[in-house]
Image (cartoon, rainbow, N blue to C red):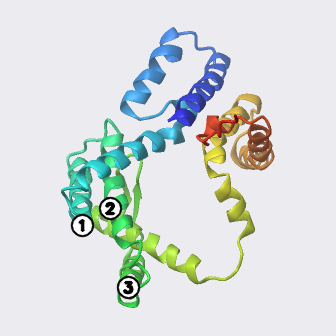
Amino acid sequence: MVPYVIFSLIGHCFLCIQIWQNGITDWRKYVLDPIYSIIFVGSTSGNTPLWFLPSLLAVQLIYSICSRKISDWGLAFLGILCAYLLFKYDIHKPLYLGNISLGIAVYAIGHKLKNIQFQREFLMMSLFVYFSLFYIQFYSIDFRANELLEGYYLLAVAFEFSGCLFINFCFKYLSMPFKLLEYVGKRSMAFYVMHWIVLLLCTVVCDYDGWKMFSTMLISSMICLPIAERSISYLNLGWVIGQKVEKRL
């Protein structure tokens, strides 16, 4: 949660600059809005993607407690059922009710299948589900808001779960090295907590739209994120992105 707190504050500071540029002086926008956003959305508007960190923590804690008495399949069923009922009855606030429910289902299924997902029978079944649903219709869920974007809710859940297994299968049996993905993966937390701030800065500094803004954001991310990550490492500030700091005697 250290990266969550630190980079939420940094992101909110830059958001305040943007709000000030827009001529808004209402103090509630600077003080109350971020509090409301954290309570009902799970993150501040200054660093929206950080919603994932407290939700992940909640999932891990709930799973750790409930898995002692409930099986992985039981937790997966309860998680999907809870998320579906929240969707069906249009309960979207706080947002984390839905994404934590889905998260528990994903976490439990991942734990159950980590050692058996590549068995021939199970793999063929998951691939059949994925490509059958893909052929019929594309399915999509906004995981953060627990909102259905395309298709039918329960089929969309099955589609996305089987899609995860398909991707795991591809990377397990592809022998080609993916240096770019490896580079990003090793620095995923740093890039994750900082990328929204870079994008926000682009909107503060540049008055572009469309492809110009997209290009500016892309180039800025490619330049700024590696530099920022290296600076954190060089200055021994790894703790700000959740890295353990070894104490020297």
| CB contact under 8 Å: marks 1 and 3 | no
Badge 3 density bin: few <14, some 14–19, many ≥20, Cα 10 Å: few
Residue for badge 1: 73
| CB contact under 8 Å: marks 2 and 1 | yes
Quarter residue 135 falls in: bottom left
Is residue 156 visible to the viewer in this orientation of the structure? no
- Left or right position of 151 against 43: left
| CB contact under 8 Å: marks 2 and 3 | no
Quarter residue 174 falls in: bottom right
Query: Percent x, y for residue 125?
Result: 35, 85
Query: Percent x, y for residue 139?
Result: 39, 67
The earlier-in-sequence mark between 2 and 1 is 1
Tell me the quarter of the image containing the C terminus. Answer: top right
Q: Secondary structure at mark 2?
A: helix
The earlier-in-sequence mark between 1 and 3 is 1
**Circle 3: residue type:** Phe
Q: CA distance from mark 2 to mark 1?
A: 7 Å
**Circle 1: residue type:** Trp
Residue at 36 percent across and 31 percent down: it is 40
Q: CA distance from mark 2 to mark 3?
A: 22 Å
Label at residue 184: none
Residue for badge 2: 108
Q: Secondary structure at mark 1?
A: helix
Query: Percent x, y for residue 84?
Result: 24, 55
- Left or right position of 216 against 138: right
Which of discs 1 and 3 lies nearer the camera? The answer is 1
Q: Residue 224 or 177: which is nearer the viewer?
A: 177
Badge 2 density bin: few <14, some 14–19, many ≥20, Cα 10 Å: many
Residue for badge 3: 128
In the picture shown, does residue 73 fall above or below 175? Answer: above
